[in-house]
Image (spheres, helix red, strand yellow):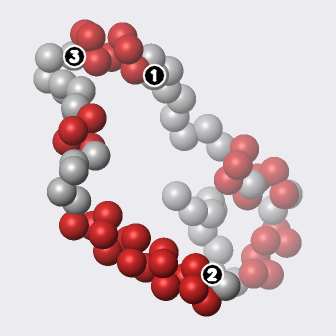
Amino acid sequence: MGEYPEMARADQKQNYKHYEIDFGRRLVAKFRFRPREFWKASKDFPAVGKAALYPTQDPLLSITEAIKAKLTETE
């Protein structure tokens, strides 16, 4: 995602009206996602269990808690 049309220099923006280069006005895609229906109907994409998402032995959790503790000390 980026500007369209591409502009090498800032002064090129003067050649366009604001709505022509406003990325927020461009709809790229629109989806409707209903998680309960999706997980029930999809055998190819089974839901990930809570134990897999939040393991009891999580090495990354201990690292992030140590970082958080150091940040809290400096406040």
Left or right of 29 in this view: 60: left
Q: CB under 8 Å between callouts 3 and 1? A: no
Could you classify mark 3 by the number of other residues whose Cα lies within 10 Å: few (under 14), some (14-19), or many (20 or more)?
few
Q: Which residue is mark 1?
A: 33
Q: Secondary structure at mark 2?
A: loop
Look at the numbered disc 3 and give the secondary structure of its residue. loop
On residue 42, which mark appears? 3
- State which tag comes first along the sequence, 1 or 2: 2
User: Element at badge 1?
Assistant: loop
Which residue in the rendered view is the most extreme toward the bottom? 74
User: Mark 3 and mark 1: span between their CA atoms?
Assistant: 13 Å
Q: Please give the label number shown on residue 25.
A: none
Residue at image position (49%, 85%) is 70
Residue 39 vs 19, above or below: the answer is above
Name the amino acid type tagged 1: Phe
Q: Position of residue 27 (x, y in %)?
A: 61, 38
Tell whether 39 sits left or right of 9.
left
Q: Nearer the viewer, residue 6 or 34?
A: 34
Please tell me which of labels 3 and 1 falls first in the chain: 1
Q: Residue at x 18, y 57 (%)?
A: 57
Foreground residue among 55 and 11: 55
The crowding category of the residue bearing disc 1, from other C-alpha atoms within 10 Å (few below 14, some 14 to 19, many at least 20), is few
In the figure, 25 relative to 70: above or below?
A: above
Residue appearing at x 79%, y 71% in the figure: 13
The quadrant in which residue 72 appears is bottom right
Q: How many marks?
A: 3
**Which amino acid, mark 2?**
Ala
Q: Which residue is the site of mark 2?
A: 8
Q: Quadrant of the C terminus?
A: bottom right
- At x 21%, y 50%, the residue is 56
Q: Amino acid at mark 3?
A: Ser
